Image (cartoon, rainbow, N blue to C red):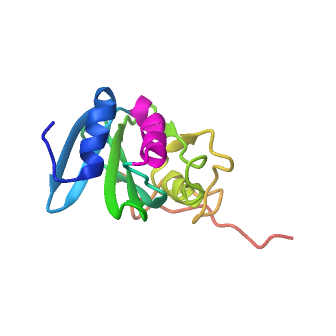
Amino acid sequence: MEDHGSTALRRLIEAQRDALVETHARLGDATALVERGQVAALLRFLRDDPDCGFDVLTDLTAVDYLGETPRFEVVYHLFSYTNRHRLRVKTRVPEEEPEVDTATGLWPSANWLEREVYDMYGIRFREHPDLRRLLLYEQFEGHPLRKDYAKERRQPLLGPRN
């Protein structure tokens, strides 16, 4: 792990080195790749540590690296109003067990963001208070942002509810 210009990233490396797989800061984007089993504790540290103070989860998304192992990556974008810095946290998630701990207890905004990732990629968030589809109907089959989802796939037709 290299030393970076990001104060938050340097603090994270100093305090949580064992949880980190790698870090980098390219073009002003400070990024930390974290072990999946450590992501909840690391996110809590980033929120609660005064030198980091990430009080906002601005976005949470996923990436599908079809053909790689692990296949998925969950990406958290954090911002600190107090310290005026940003950090991207990533964790890799295997296709065979596509799940990671929820961040809803840390940032309420994680609720709908995690539901969207579940809906589009099929990645589950352990202990999420209401993990169900957000954008698609419950009978929709598959997860359309996965790279192996067939765009020509036909979906069940649903009639009006009585």
Q: Is residue 162 above or below residue 78?
A: below
Does the rendering let one see residue 133?
yes
Q: Is residue 77 above or below residue 18?
A: below
At horizontal 15% and vertical 36% (from top left) the residue drawn is 1
Q: Quadrant of residue 139?
A: bottom right
Where residue 145 sits in the image (x, y, percent)? 40, 58
Where residue 4 sits in the image (x, y, percent)? 16, 48
Task: Give 85 or 42, whichever is nearer the viewer.
Answer: 85
At horizontal 24% and vertical 39% (from top left) the residue drawn is 68
Question: In the image, is 93 to the left or to the right of 126?
Answer: left
In the image, the segment drawn in magenta is: 36-50
Q: In which quarter of the image is residue 18?
A: top left
* Residue 160 sits inside the magenta stretch: no
Task: Give 22 or 48, whichever is nearer the viewer.
Answer: 48
Where residue 26 sits in the image (x, y, percent)? 14, 56
Question: In the image, is 45 to the left or to the right of 109?
Answer: left
Q: Quadrant of the C terminus?
A: bottom right
* Residue 47 sits inside the magenta stretch: yes
At horizontal 42% and vertical 62% (from top left) the residue drawn is 82
Q: In this view, does 74 lie above or below 127?
A: below
Dominant secondary structure of the residues highlighted in magenta in the image: helix
Question: In the image, is 148 to the left or to the right of 114?
Answer: left
Task: Give 7 or 92, whichever is nearer the viewer.
Answer: 7
At horizontal 25% and vertical 41% (from top left) the residue drawn is 67
